[in-house]
Image: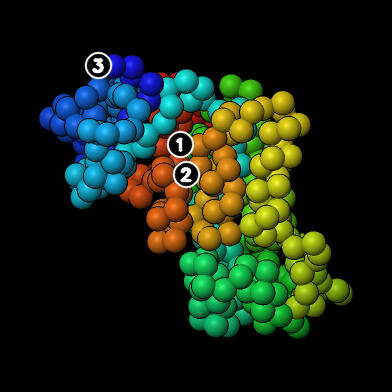
Amino acid sequence: MSLSHTLTLVARRDATTLTDAQVRAARDMVKGGAPVILSPGEAVDIPCPAPGPGMPTLDTIRAVFGPRHVDTLLTRSRGRRKGLLVADMDSTIVANETLDDLAAHAGIGERIAEITRRSMNGEIDFESALRERVGLLKGLPASLLDTAWKDVRLNEGARELVATMRARNAHTALVSGGFTFFTGRVAALCGFSEHHANVLESRDGTLTGEVGTPILGPDAKRAHLHRLAEAGRLKPAATMAVGDGANDLAMLREAGLGIAFHGKPIVRAAVTNRVDHTTLRTLLFAQGYPAASFVSVD
């Protein structure tokens, strides 16, 4: 039986340790080959056959390991290391929803956060939600952007992910439905090759309540994925995308490896591979990188 795929198990380091018994159980479930340790007690690859009759689904495997704070991902063994990463920013590369933070400093946090929640869950379309939220910012001082920036925190593994992939000549792009004020700074912190987002308009130090056009939404994210793949002469299979919200679905579905990162329910239901318990380090493990090869960034 051909072991054409790889099942990757990754444990949440601050909550559990991946045990030999768990690895054996996973190997038995998928009729897998000898495991390859990527990080002792944290991550392991198990070569296995392709999904099909007589094989458990990934959801079945998740049901066993998820309660133990272990993520499970399934990838084709060939071409695992990707030449392009396209990443969402809010609640993916950073822990924040930057527009919500901006609104909170303006005293309208609850109003905007509810619109954000509905948009990210696919209940209302992204462009309408963005225009409505930005409209509520009209008349506020643009200096609030600097205040909100002080709250921004990178998610664990963000800098390692970008640095490690770039060290292997991958192109990395931060593509967000948020604002260039934040993506430029986050891209610089993480070392992304480029960034793209919406422009929050201001005049004489005051937010106008308008966003520049064209608006960067779901279709634009997908278009950036394809454009960058073509520019790098990469086949779709050589691309990776990561995000958490409904506006990321188009690019996640069309990337060679699309990963929902602590995704909203609509995203978790639609994307094969997802990270529910662990960190952005898992995106490197999913490509077969051992932890010893990660590029550490102080």
- Which residue position is annotated with label 1? 283
Give residue 57's mark.
none
In this view of the protein, can residue 140 be seen by the observer?
no
Occupied quadrant, residue 1: top left
Label 1 crowd (10 A; few <14 / some 14-19 / many >=20): many
- Vertically, is 25 above or below 58? above
Q: Are marks 1 and 3 in contact (CB under 8 Å)?
A: no
> Colour scheme in the image?
rainbow
Label 3 residue SS: loop
User: In 3D space, how far apart are the residues under numbered discs 2 and 1 (Cα atoms)?
Assistant: 8 Å
Q: Are marks 2 and 1 in contact (CB under 8 Å)?
A: yes
Tell us which disc is closer to us: 1 or 3. 3
- Vertically, is 155 above or below 6? below
Residue sitting at the far left:
21
Question: Which numbered disc flags the more N-terminal residue, 2 or 1?
Answer: 2
User: In 3D space, how far apart are the residues under numbered discs 1 and 3 (Cα atoms)?
Assistant: 22 Å
Percent position (x, y) of residue 24? 16, 26
Q: Who is closer to the viewer here, 171 or 164? A: 171
Label 2 residue SS: strand
Left or right for 140, reference 31: right
Residue at the image point whose x is 65% and y is 48% from the top: 222
Percent position (x, y) of residue 172? 64, 36
Label 1 residue SS: helix
Q: Who is closer to the viewer here, 60 or 70? A: 60
- Vertically, is 31 above or below 220? above
User: In 3D space, how far apart are the residues under numbered discs 3 and 2 (Cα atoms)?
Assistant: 25 Å
- Which residue position is annotated with label 2? 259
Looking at the rendered structure, the kind of residue marked 1 is: Leu
- Which residue position is annotated with label 3? 34
Looking at the rendered structure, the kind of residue marked 3 is: Ala
Tell us which disc is closer to us: 2 or 1. 2
